[in-house]
């Protein structure tokens, strides 16, 4: 008997050109290989309809995400209220297939009595109210700070409300622990779905240190700025910052520094080449929720990775990283590792850890067992 599954996506998961859609996209072929019939529902706001998704799904539907003026609510966070749709509700009520909601963003229908007895599952990419609090702390815009603080408070109330009424699938054990404290009775850790990466046989010595990420995100700009101003300022080591849409302020900080290079908007191939050629990937984070895809990418495809506790907390990746707790520790670790060839035994540690944890086939089977147990 065929097994059918509705998946509601917070965005169109193709092309796979930013970290937030990796798990959404690579889950589709993994489930299709297990003969799951996928009915995909995407909220679209700028990425357009993508025929590529039809390869993995029985059907694909698109819904326009609501604008501010039509999504304002005193009951729901904006990321949730802007993804409500009467057309989606109508389609989902035409059958009784299980529903996988990709992110808290897509959980509006958990509040609808018509879905009270429906099998609903929520993929938890972050603990959103904590994530938005960190965004609030990182941004300098007065308007953005006001919005992010309000959204964080709304999300905290909302996430407490929905925690007991669905099965949640967090990407880290730590996020699962937070949801259990919020009252979640069904919470199962499920690793990210990724490209078919295998640990690259990169040994020896790279030629520079690298920080990479979406530089249009305030938290990532804050991390890059901290590295420039507090960590690498007195180290005569080549340093590359690479990522999407760096601000004029970040460009000015880099200007005139002989040992620093800023690469704006590198293509996917160029970014992977930078990760492979770097000797040290330096990836501090101010946000301890979710899992950092850029770190996983660097562990599969690069040499040394230096992180702080927030980058790896609850991820299971600690053994593959060098952890530094403050500015002084980052400096000393960078100096030590930059002059140390990357040893082959580190590759074996990563293989043992990553190839098992991020196995799309095994994780698809786990997901199926959770839904149809």
Image (tube, rainbow, N blue to C red):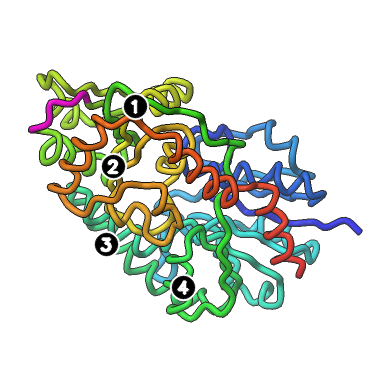
Residue ID at (48%, 65%): 173
Q: Is residue 135 part of the magenta span, yes or no?
A: no
Q: Which numbered disc, 4 or 2, marks the residue that appears first in the sequence?
A: 4
Q: Is residue 82 above or below residue 373?
A: above
For the residues marked 1 and 2, what is the alpha-carbon distance in whole angstroms? 19 Å
- Expressed as whole percent of the image width and height from the top left, the position of residue 329 reads 17, 48
> Looking at the rendered structure, which numbered label has been put on residue 355?
none
Mark 4 and 2 residues: CB-CB less than 8 Å, in contact? no
Q: Residues within 10 Å of mark 2 (few under 14, many from 20)?
A: many
Q: Nearer the viewer, residue 171 or 53?
A: 171
Q: Nearer the viewer, residue 323 or 73?
A: 323
Disc marking residue 220 = 2
Give the mark toward the camera: 1 or 3.
1
Numbered range of the magenta stretch = 234-238
Residue linked to disc 4: 179
The kind of secondary structure element at disc 3 is: helix
Q: Position of residue 358 (x, y in %)?
A: 58, 48
Calculate the distance from the C-alpha at mark 4 to the C-alpha at mark 3.
20 Å
Res. 278 mark: 1
CA gap, disc 4 to disc 2? 26 Å
- Quick check: marks 1 and 2 in contact, CB under 8 Å? no
**4 vs 3, front mark:** 4
Counting from the top left corner in percent of width and height, residue 59 is at 76, 44
Q: Residue at x 61, y 36 (%)?
A: 196
- Dominant secondary structure (helix, strand or loop) of the stretch shown in magenta: loop
Which image quarter is the N terminus in?
Answer: bottom right
Task: Give neighbour class at mark 1: few <14, some 14-19, many 20+ (Cα, 10 Å).
Answer: many
Q: Quadrant of residue 7?
A: bottom right
Numbered badge on residue 149: 3
Q: Is residue 161 left or right of residue 341?
A: right
If you read the primary sequence from the N terminus, does the residue marked by circle 1 or circle 4 appear first?
Answer: 4
């Amino acid at each position: 008997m065929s097994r059918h599954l509705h998946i509601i996506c917070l965005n169109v998961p193709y092309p796979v050109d930013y970290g937030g859609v990796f798990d959404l996209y690579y889950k589709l072929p993994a489930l299709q290989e297990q003969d799951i019939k996928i009915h995909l529902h995407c909220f679209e706001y700028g990425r357009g309809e993508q025929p590529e998704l039809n390869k993995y799904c029985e059907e694909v539907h698109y819904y326009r995400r609501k604008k501010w003026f039509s999504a304002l609510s005193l009951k729901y966070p904006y990321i949730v209220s802007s993804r409500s749709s009467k057309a989606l509700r109508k389609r989902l009520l035409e059958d009784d297939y299980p529903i996988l909601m990709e992110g808290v963003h897509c959980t509006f229908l958990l509040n609808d009595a018509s879905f009270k007895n429906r099998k609903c599952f929520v993929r938890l990419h972050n603990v959103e109210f904590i994530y938005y609090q960190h965004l609030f702390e990182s941004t300098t815009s007065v308007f953005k700070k006001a919005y992010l603080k309000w959204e964080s408070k709304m999300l905290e109330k909302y996430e407490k409300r929905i925690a007991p009424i669905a099965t949640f699938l967090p990407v880290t054990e730590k996020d699962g622990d937070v949801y259990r404290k919020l009252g979640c009775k069904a919470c199962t850790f499920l690793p990210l779905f990724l490209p078919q990466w295998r640990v690259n046989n990169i040994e020896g010595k790279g030629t520079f240190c690298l920080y990479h990420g979406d530089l249009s995100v305030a938290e990532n700009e804050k991390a890059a700025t901290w590295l420039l101003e507090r960590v690498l300022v007195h180290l005569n080591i080549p340093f590359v910052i690479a990522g999407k849409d760096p601000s004029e302020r970040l460009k000015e900080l880099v200007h005139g520094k002989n040992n620093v290079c800023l690469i704006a908007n590198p293509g996917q191939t160029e970014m992977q080449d930078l990760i492979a050629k770097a000797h040290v990937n330096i990836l501090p984070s101010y946000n301890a929720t979710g899992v950092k895809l850029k770190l996983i990418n660097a562990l599969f495809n690069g040499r040394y990775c230096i992180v702080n506790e927030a980058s790896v907390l609850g991820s299971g990746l600690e053994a593959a990283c060098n952890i530094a707790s403050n500015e002084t520790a980052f400096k000393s670790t960078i100096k030590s590792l930059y002059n140390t060839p990357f040893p082959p035994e580190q590759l074996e540690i990563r293989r043992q850890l990553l190839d098992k944890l991020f196995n799309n086939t095994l994780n698809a089977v786990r997901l199926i067992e959770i839904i149809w147990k």
